Every structure is written in structure tokens, then in C-alpha cells.
Image: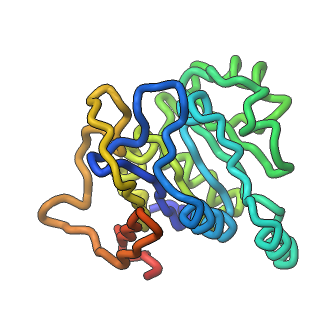
Amino acid sequence: MAERPYTLLSCGMSIDGYLDDTTEERLLLSNDADFDRVDEVRAGCDAILVGAATIRQDNPRLLVRSAARRADRLARGLPENPVKVTVTSRADLDPAASFFTTGASEKLVYCATPALARARERLGAVATVVDGGDPVDVHLVSADLAARGVRRLMVEGGGMMHTQFLTRDLADELHVVVAPFFVGDSRAPRFVHDGAFPAGPKNRATLAEVRQIGDCVLLRYGLSDRFQG
């Protein structure tokens, strides 16, 4: 197998497994204490990856919020913030989105081959656009990130990205924070889509930690023999 980064998947979901509801306003699935925990995890990673749909829907900045953690990264010879990474099949992304315009970190866009020219025309001034295959192959993405020096990758969603990294057996660790409420709407996006998952009934994931964080709970799972428990 080609070298790839140690890959940590992170998400918040409702009790019934939804990442969001169907309204235009972003659904907050966590609390301040957990946002700080996520910030700490981000600060320990070389790159953060989200899907294009997450950029369109949530307009995330994907920055380390704590000034002390940014200073610590600089003291260790790292940039203030991890590299930002996204994956797109159509290059339907706004170059003015916060993903591209906030922070001085490198931005990488892995684009499906048929949309590569459009992506470079649209996003080439704000990001490095990379041919990701047709369709985009997350194995190729992982190998390319490793070649660029990314040793620890954090995948923050959405459901399509989580599904691809899990079903392609590219995930080493999973953090799931469960919020204390139900969404109750089957139209809402779920944590994962249909697929054949290596961590099935006959190959159970390793539960490494259960932690109460205010009114939420963190479940941390090991998914591979590279798990850093």
C-alpha cells in the first residue's frame, strides 16, 4: 500500500445520527468545551479535509482558533494553521468562500479530471488544484498528501467524505460527538451513506474512550492497526 497520512475522522451528530437538519441555518451539534477540544485536535494535524458540499453549506474557516496553539505550532517550525484540503467533482466552489480567503495556510483542491480546467480557471488564484482522478479517488488524495509532507490528516466531513474514507479503509481513528437531541427528519444529512464498511459486525471497531463533555459525549474509536490509542 502507498504511504498515506495517519487519518482521523471527526464529526458531531444528533442522537439519531444526523449531521445537520434541513434548515438554512447551521445546526450546532456541540458546545464550547467540545469546540475547544476540536481546536486542540486541529492544532495537532498537518491538514484538514472537508468535502465541497461542506464548504458550500457551512462556509467553514478551518483555522486553529487558539492563539496559544498557533504560537506553539510556529515554535515547532510549523505554519500557524494546517493545510486546508477539499475534494470536488464539479469545481462548483466560490473562490470567495472562507475556506480560500481566511488564514495564510496552503489550500489544496482535488478535482475530478473532467472538471480540472474549469477548477484551475475558477480557483487557481486562491488554491493549488490537483487532478484527483475520474471520479476523485481518495486513495490518490491520501498518497498525494503524504508526498506533500502531510503525516496527520483530519477529515471533518461531510457524510460523503466520511463514507469514502471509511469504506476505502483509509481511516485510523474516529471521533464522534453525540449531541443530546434528535433531528427526526430523514431528509437531513447523515453521518455516513450506504457502503461496505471494514468495521462491520464481524470486525468491531476498538472503543478507546468515552468522555462526557458538558451535555455531549465523545466516543473515540480505533479503526486500524495504526491507531494511536
Would you place residue 81 above or below residue 20 in this image?
below
Q: Residue at x 68, y 49 (%)?
A: 62
Quadrant where the C terminus is found in the figure: bottom left
Q: Residue at x 36, y 72 (%)?
A: 222
Please indicate whether residue 107 sits to the left or right of residue 15 in the image. right
**From this viewpoint, which residue is outermost toward the bottom?**
229
Foreground residue among 216 and 8: 216
Give x and y (percent) for residue 196. Answer: 23, 47
Q: Residue at x 40, y 73 (%)?
A: 212
Foreground residue among 207 and 13: 13
**From this viewpoint, which residue is outermost toward the left?**
202
Please indicate whether residue 195 sits to the left or right of residue 221 in the image. left
Give x and y (percent) for residue 128. Answer: 76, 38
Give x and y (percent) for residue 83. Answer: 72, 53
Residue 225: which quarter of the image? bottom left
Quadrant where the N terminus is found in the figure: bottom left
Would you place residue 202 above or below residue 61 in this image?
below
Give x and y (percent) for residue 116. Answer: 65, 24
